[in-house]
Image (cartoon, grey):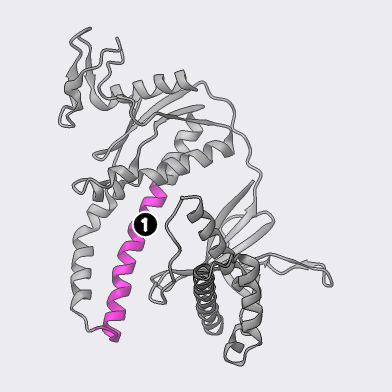
Amino acid sequence: MNKGVIFRAYPTKEQAELISKTLGCSRLIYNKGLAYRNESYKKGEKVGYNQTSAMLTAMKTEEKYSFLNEVDSIALQQSLRDLDSAFTRFFNKKSKYPVFKSKHHYQLSYRTVNQKNKKQKNYSIRIEGNRIRLPKLGFLKFKQTMEVGHINNVTVRRTATGKYFVILNVDFEPEKLESSSNFTGIDVGIKTFYKDSNGNVVNNPKYLEKSQKKLKREQRKLSRKKKNSKNRQKQRLKVARVHEKIANQRNDFIHKITTKLINENQVIAVEDLNIKGMLKNHKLAKSISSVSWSKFFDTLEYKAEWYGRKVIKVPTMYPSSQTCSKCGYKNPLVKNLSVRVWECPCCHARHDRDLNASVNILNKGLSVA
């Protein structure tokens, strides 16, 4: 298997300038390729990666684009592959039509592939001590926090706060965990992050809500700064740091709880929620985005695949909250979200809404597995 690992990088001033130039050139080639494909489609011509690659080769021979030869050539080719992938997703109706990239996006990245040098018999990307060698950049200082396998490709990222990271795609052989007899169903929520069928409750940390006051204050200051001024740039960094902290806190929280669930349970049943549709509810959209259910489910799934666990998705429209987990009676009155505790009119069992839903999700998951 492959996995991505991310490490903080500390480029020199010259390396930072070259990274900025590579980011700019990658964006230029992407936009040129997109414009070329748009014009060709209008003429009724079919254009793919091979044609845009030939366009790049021709551009490098022109004097006004001579600066393209100063940066990593593989990174430029990868930007065209990314463009080709964007069109493939569009034709498969998985995303919208590709758009031009703006230089005003502060978080940028480029990707380069690890290749073997036949003469020197070593790889273009390799780690030596506390440095990683990258094409054109040479040896870049970075903070390695774990051992990695063979490196397939590297993404160099510059964040909105001006920090640099290297994201390594490496070969990975996960060790399967010992089989467990524990099964659990999970009902996610907003007030509580989730409640499982065993009665365990994980509270929603609400990182965005806790930082909302500070974020509003910093954004208000930013809106008052003169455009293109140095003070505006300084204030933009302050806003970006608040967002970065919230994202880091959320990612750390999700990785910890998913690891705990995978370690403790053999089978985990979850709801297959239509989160994109739920975000159309403007009263709940902000809270749903903050709680990050999508990332939670995605992380749970790939960790389950790594370690030999199983995640079962229960159908979206299954009425887990309305169904009595004891006798199966469906109570339509529970559809109202304000009903948190209810008694079954049929068997008179008293239910906590979320706990009952998690038990139903587990039972349904095991029946459809």
Q: Residue furthest front?
A: 44
Which residue is at a point 17% across and 29% down the rendered structure image? 336
Give percent across and percent down for residue 307. 58, 36
Based on the picture, tell me whether residue 322 belongs to the magenta stretch.
no
Chief secondary structure of the magenta span?
Answer: helix
Q: Residue furthest top?
A: 347
Q: Nearer the viewer, residue 172 or 339?
A: 339
Q: Which residue is mark 1?
A: 247
Neighbourhood count class around disc 1 (C-alpha, 10 Å): few under 14, some 14–19, many 20 upward: some
Q: Secondary structure at mark 1?
A: helix
Give percent across and percent down for residue 120. 82, 72
Q: Is residue 9 visible?
A: yes
Which residue is at a point 51% across and 78% down the rendered structure image? 28
Give percent across and percent down for residue 366. 46, 20
**Start-end of magenta stretch:** 227-253
Task: Write down the quadrant of residue 204 in the picture.
Answer: top left
Q: Amino acid at mark 1?
A: Ala
Residue 38, above or below 196? below
Based on the picture, tell me whether residue 237 belongs to the magenta stretch.
yes
Which residue is at a point 50% across and 23% down the rendered structure image? 369
Which residue is at a point 46% across and 21% down the rendered structure image? 368
Q: Image check: 338 left or right of 258? A: left
Please state the total of marks drawn on the protein image: 1
